[in-house]
Image: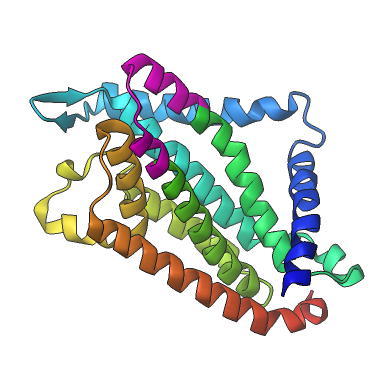
Amino acid sequence: MINKLEKIYRILPNFVIRDIKEKYAGSSIGVFWTFIHPLLVILLYWLVFSKIMKIRVPAGTGDLPYLPFLLSGLLPWLALSDGIMRGASSIVDKAYIIKKVFFPPELLTVSVVVSSLIHHGAGFLIFLTAYFIITGSVTMLQIVALITLLAVQFLLTVGLALILASLSVYIRDILQIISVILQALFYMTTILYPISAVPETLRQIISLNPFTALIEGYHEVILFGRVPENFSLLYLGVTVAVSLTAGRMLFRRLKQGFADVL
């Protein structure tokens, strides 16, 4: 077990660095796409939902500015969805490596998730720094809670990516299905609108979405300086445990046939 962990520790950084380099290979502006693409997406949603649809975020006796609300949910979501999508195709995309080199194939999936977290985490860090400087207030509780939420998000993404990566080798249509599901989940998660804007009849359905619990956690910590509710934390913990366990078991069972199918 210790030898396997040491091997993973040595190999994983190399895979992450390679994935980041490949992501920008052939691009004339390279790493600047890390900021350009999210900025364009943020500008579009801000214009539509804040200026055209006039979405308001109630907070006590007034309203919160829409932009911090949008960024505190959208930036983590971009890392999450990108990690799931790219993780789901990580084995199929690197088929040539699996056929030629013997190594734990799950490293390909984990490295893609880490790469996505780094890619989108840069913008999230800039936002957090700017927001806390402007508001002039950040507590140790917020820092610890944010680190915890990021760890939960990473583990959840790895678990889901392992499940989808192992299945996509045998069922290629899964990649297209996941794209559609993630798009639907995006609008069913409280990223573009506050939970208070959801009608009572639909609020329970939206709350059952584990991604809503995660994004609401970011909203609570960043915007209100509060720790998420105990039920939300428990729900997230159970979801992470189930996804990781299922991901490991399914990947371990199916990876024996990867080389033959690919």
Q: Does the magenta stretch include residue 32?
A: no
Residue positioned most to the left = 61
> How did the renderer colour the structure?
rainbow
Would you say the magenta stretch is mainly helix, strand or loop?
helix
Q: Is residue 66 left or right of residue 105?
A: left
Q: Which of 17 and 66 is in front in this view?
A: 17
Q: Is residue 82 left or right of residue 53?
A: right
Residue positioned most to the right = 100
Q: Can residue 209 be seen in this view?
A: no
Q: Residue at x 61, y 62 (%)?
A: 88
Span highlighted in magenta in the image: 126-145
Q: Does the magenta stretch include residue 138?
A: yes
**Image position of 201 with respect to 59: above or below:** below
Q: Which residue is drawn at 11% across and 58% down?
A: 201
- Measuring from the top left, give residue 127's x and y in whole percent: 46, 26
Q: Which of 244 and 54 is in front in this view?
A: 244
- Measuring from the top left, give residue 164's x and y in whole percent: 58, 68
- Measuring from the top left, give residue 253's x and y in whole percent: 65, 84
Instruction: State which quarter of the image contains the N terminus.
Output: bottom right
Q: How many marks?
A: 0
**Image position of 124 with respect to 78: above or below:** above
Q: Is residue 127 left or right of residue 63?
A: right
- Measuring from the top left, give residue 172's x and y in whole percent: 64, 70
Instruction: State which quarter of the image contains the C terminus.
Output: bottom right
Q: Residue at x 74, y 28 (%)?
A: 30
Question: Which of the 4 image quarters holds residue 224?
Answer: top left
Q: Nearer the viewer, residue 73 or 89?
A: 73
